[in-house]
Image: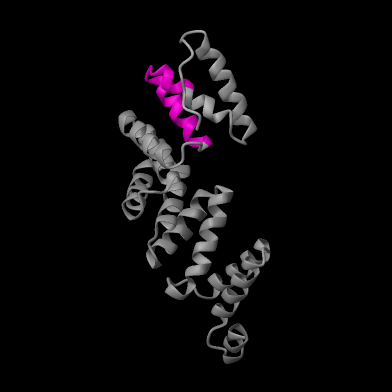
Amino acid sequence: QRAIELWRSGKGIGYYFMYLGDQAYDQGDVHLALSYYEMSHAIDDALDARKLRMYRNRCAYETRQQDAAEAIFWCTRATQVHKTVWTLLALGQAFYTAGDYRAALSALEQARSLNPRVANVHYYLGLTYQRLGQAELAQDAYQQGLKLSPSHQYLNWAAGRLYEQMGQLPEAYCCYLRVTRGSNQTLKKSASDALQRLSASVPTPVCDSR
């Protein structure tokens, strides 16, 4: 009803398409939503707090698509309007994908300061620290993430690889073992290969059952 009122008024056609996009997105028709959002943005591309849902939806979509440039644009807008751990995490992911690790670190550290209990924030912080050559900070980030989500498959894989690079083979072994209990088959296969490799050079450690 609100969208129709805006259309009839002739004063808010951009909002009309935005509301239609929000509705389509909520109904799961993402491609239709994107079409409406594009029309809304073409009519009026000014930063506007009333467009927060559009910004967040576009941020989430472009992050999933790994389109770094688009994700940075929309996640930045979402963050400018409403800074949350989720918009900052998405922005950090986008900068990481684009290879701008300093910008990624800034966004992710802000996300952690808002909510330090989100495992994925620590995961991407760890990846980013590694890219910046800060292995000890990366290790700490992974450890913090695993305290929050011990079975997190990607966290265990990243931590295991770092432990192995640092010569901490029992810790690496236990991380790889937890990876094999996850659902991603590619990671499971890689972890199984890593376990076989480590078994030849380190006594089988006692790992927790997480």
Residue name at image x 67 percent, y 67 percent: 27
Q: Quadrant of residue 40?
A: bottom right
Relative placement, left or right, of 76 versus 137 is right
* Closer to the camera in the image, 38 or 107: 107
Residue 196 screen position, x and y as percent: 56, 14
Estimate the x, y position of residue 146 in percent, counting from the top left: 42, 37
Q: Nearer the viewer, residue 43 or 22?
A: 22
Question: Residue shown at 31%/52% (left/top)?
Answer: 113
Report the magenta residues as a range.
Answer: 153-173
104 up-or-down from 177: above or below: below
Residue beneath the point at 35% across and 36% down: 129
Count numbered badges in the picture: 0
Q: Does residue 161 show up magenta in the picture? A: yes
Residue 139 position by quadrant:
top left
In the picture, the quarter occupied by the N terminus is bottom right
Farthest-out residue, bottom: 9
Q: Position of residue 49 (x, y in %)?
A: 42, 73
Depth order, front residue of 183/86: 183
3 above or below 131?
below
Horizontal side, residue 136 vs residue 197: left or right: left
Our reading of the magenta stretch's main secondary structure is: helix
Q: Residue furthest top?
A: 200
* Looking at the image, residue 147 lies above or below residue 198: below
Residue 122 x/y as whole percent: 39, 42
Q: In the image, 210: left or right of 65?
A: left
Q: How is the image coloured?
A: one colour
Magenta run includes residue 142: no
